[in-house]
Amino acid sequence: MTTATTPTEQFADIARRGQEATTAAVEGWTRALRGYTDAVTPEGLRPVDLQVATSAAFDLAGRILTTQREFATTALALVTEATESTTAHVTQAGETLKARTDEATERVIDLASQTTRRAADAARNGVSV
């Protein structure tokens, strides 16, 4: 797996893997249903063997359940990854914003101090501001 470098690439990669998981699940369900229908479809005039049909029904249920479990596990992992990625990007953006706000605040304080000093100097010199 390649590591995505931007948030957009990361989310596109997660979406692609989600699509692949969905496709694999549907293909698994299709194979399971095909196996079931092959087992319970009568051949010619011979009736379906009830033992074979019963076994095929339980095999179908087991395969579908296994496929659903794999899909759910993959989907939850992708949702967790997307959440962690979003949290990391939001945290980074928040830290950047805080740093820039701190810098701007310091600059405003410096400018206010300079303005106060200039006003005090002007007042001492008898100049009105």
Image (cartoon, rainbow, N blue to C red):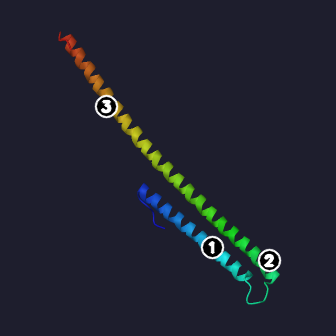
Give the structural element (helix, strand or loop) at label 2: helix
- Look at 44% across and 61% down and name the residue there: 4
Distance of label 1 from label 2 (alpha carbons): 20 Å
Q: Is the residue 107 above or below the residue 82 in the image? A: above
Lower sequence index among marks 1 and 2: 1
Residue 111, picture quadrant: top left
Q: Amino acid at mark 2?
A: Thr
Q: Residue furthest front?
A: 45
Q: Which residue is mark 2?
A: 54
Neighbourhood count class around disc 1 (C-alpha, 10 Å): few under 14, some 14–19, many 20 upward: some
Q: Nearer the viewer, mark 1 or mark 2?
A: 2
Q: Is the residue 66 above or below the residue 107 in the image? A: below
Q: Position of residue 65 (x, y in %)?
A: 70, 67
Q: Residue furthest top?
A: 126
Q: Nearer the viewer, mark 3 or mark 2?
A: 2
Q: Amino acid at mark 3?
A: Arg
Circles 1, 3 touching at the beta carbon (< 8 Å): no
Give the structural element (helix, strand or loop) at label 1: helix
Along the line of sight, which residue is nearer the eye, 83 or 54? 54
Lower sequence index among marks 1 and 3: 1
Q: Is residue 59 left or right of residue 81?
A: right
Q: Is residue 100 left or right of residue 27?
A: left
Q: Which residue is mark 3?
A: 107
Q: Nearer the viewer, mark 1 or mark 3?
A: 1
Q: Which residue is mark 1?
A: 28
Q: Amino acid at mark 1?
A: Gly
Q: Position of residue 63 (x, y in %)?
A: 69, 72
Along the line of sight, which residue is nearer the eye, 76 or 113? 76
Along the line of sight, which residue is nearer the eye, 36 or 93? 36
Neighbourhood count class around disc 3 (C-alpha, 10 Å): few under 14, some 14–19, many 20 upward: few
Residue 31, picture quadrant: bottom right
